[in-house]
Image (spheres, helix red, strand yellow):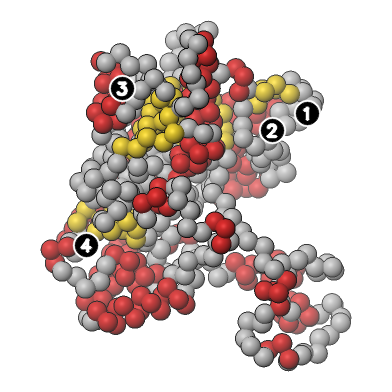
Amino acid sequence: MVHLTTVQSDKALEQPIVEGIENITFDQAEDDQTVSVYGSRFAAQEIPAHEMPDQEMPKEIAYRMIRDDLSLDGNPMLNLASFVTTYMEEEVEKLMAEALPKNFIDYEEYPQTAEIQNRCVSMIARLFNAPTQNPNDNAMGTSTVGSSEAIMLGTLAMKKRWQNKRKAEGKDYSKPNIVMNSAVQVCWEKAARYFEVEERYVFCTEDRYVIDPEECVKLVDENTIGICAIIGTTYTGEYEDVKAINDLLVKDNIDCPIHVDAASGGFVAPFVVPELEWDFRLEKVISINVSGHKYGLVYPGVGWVVWRSPEYLPKELVFNINYLGADQASFTLNFSKGASHVIGQYYQMIRLGKRGYRSIMLNLTRTADYLAACLEQLGFILMSKTGGKGLPLVAFRLDPAKGHHYDEFAIAHNLRERGWVVPAYTMAPHSEKLKLMRVVVREDFSRSRCDALIKDFKLACETLNAMDKPTIEKHKEHVQKHTSHGKKKPNHKRYQNEKHSLQGKTGK
């Protein structure tokens, strides 16, 4: 997701950081040939932020100025909020860097890169047990910028297929809806809103954080384009019971497809719980998306979407073009994109193989289980699953029976002072009174780093226990007013207080 940025007015840019500093002037040397970067005139100037400068600067200085600016970012390896890959081997980094000039969409110029994408699609489709017996009815798929684009494409395909069927039957096709859990990632809200599909939610409760199969099927009617089921929810990492939904649809003879959002779990479940039926083994599952840049172990951003057969991808959504020098079919929301991440995905799949992925995912699961056990010993209540029954993450909350005078957000702020980014948040709508924290265990989160986190958790709780409530409230106020991670990022006033998203409607 790209943040919406407000372009500041000229008047706002004229305001100094410190009142009165505009009256102070400094003599500047005009000579660009200096001994060091920091001896140049550029080091004594404000770095361009709002308007392109009139003159160029030496490449060494541009590099150093930007690198210094980026040094204020956090350490990606300590960001335990994100599912996104933060480690790849040097060899694949070199391959990806060499492919930076390649425009992936230009199949005529880069045919082998297109072939590598085809290999990836085939490997992923087979990993998800796509039917391969019929030579005239092949599974098909494509790479995307991430799972958000993949979900958009999957939603479009379901909507168009439903519309075509309704038109053929001479029925109204103006009121499509889609059924999903209220704990979906925001890209599902976007897909429904952008493509004018009514959202029908199965809401979470205080003791259920995944979709209820029976409630889900009850929401289906003749206008339902499909059901979204999640393999690895964002909130707690749980796998939704796709098989139960499938079996209910089959039992009641309901013609409704399932799209599986396996953004996080698609590269985990096949290796940790291969017996779990959630993919194309189920007849109602017609499309699956997965993020290569999460547990696919590739830097952001690459995603994948696979359809069971061409029947589920209407022909009119695929565009044929030849202005890049050859006939080619295109089904994407964007056009040009880099080839690096597709190549990175292929490297990981042939470098690691199934055994390598299995070893990594099992290690992550063991580390997550160890962390979960330690946090339970520290008095936290576990909200995620262990033993491979969910993603390798740990979701947990304070025990309300212990009457703490601080909350999960206070712990998160305290950990942030030690460099860790461990998010605190409220649960999905209808269970939003629950506060929780989450640690995502990624490939580079080793047992020794886990031990360091546990020590800092203990220290954070001891520090907060030693503080009285007024002091904690003052510290919370300080964090919200004066730290980059505490302050709300300013949006244009036109877009504040919206009421159309789940968060806007419910205050979640």
What residue lies at 62% left-to-right and 70% top-to-bottom? 69
Q: Along the horizontal axis of the image, is 497 left or right of 252?
A: right
Q: CA distance from mark 1 to mark 3?
A: 42 Å
Badge nearest the viewer, 2 or 3: 3
Q: CA distance from mark 1 to mark 2?
A: 9 Å
**In this orientation, does residue 36 appear?**
no
For marks 4 and 3 on the same chain, the one whose residue lies earlier in the sequence: 3
Q: Which mark is residue 105?
A: 2
Badge nearest the viewer, 2 or 4: 4
Callout 2 touching callout 3 (CB < 8 Å): no
For marks 2 and 4 on the same chain, the one whose residue lies earlier in the sequence: 2
Q: CA distance from mark 1 to mark 4?
A: 58 Å
**In this orientation, does residue 187 appear?**
yes
Name which residue type carries label 4. Answer: Leu
Q: Secondary structure at mark 1?
A: loop
Work out whether 34 lies above or below 369: below
Q: Residues within 10 Å of mark 2 (few under 14, many from 20)?
A: many
Q: Which mark is residue 324?
A: 1
Q: Nearer the viewer, residue 199 or 99?
A: 199
Name the residue beneath numbered marker 4.
398
Image quadrant assignment for residue 284? top left
Name the residue beneath numbered marker 3.
246
What residue lies at 68% left-to-right and 45% top-to-bottom? 100
Work out whether 457 lies above or below 34: above
Q: Secondary structure at mark 4?
A: loop
Name which residue type carries label 1. Answer: Leu
- Percent across and percent down for residue 443 are 41, 49
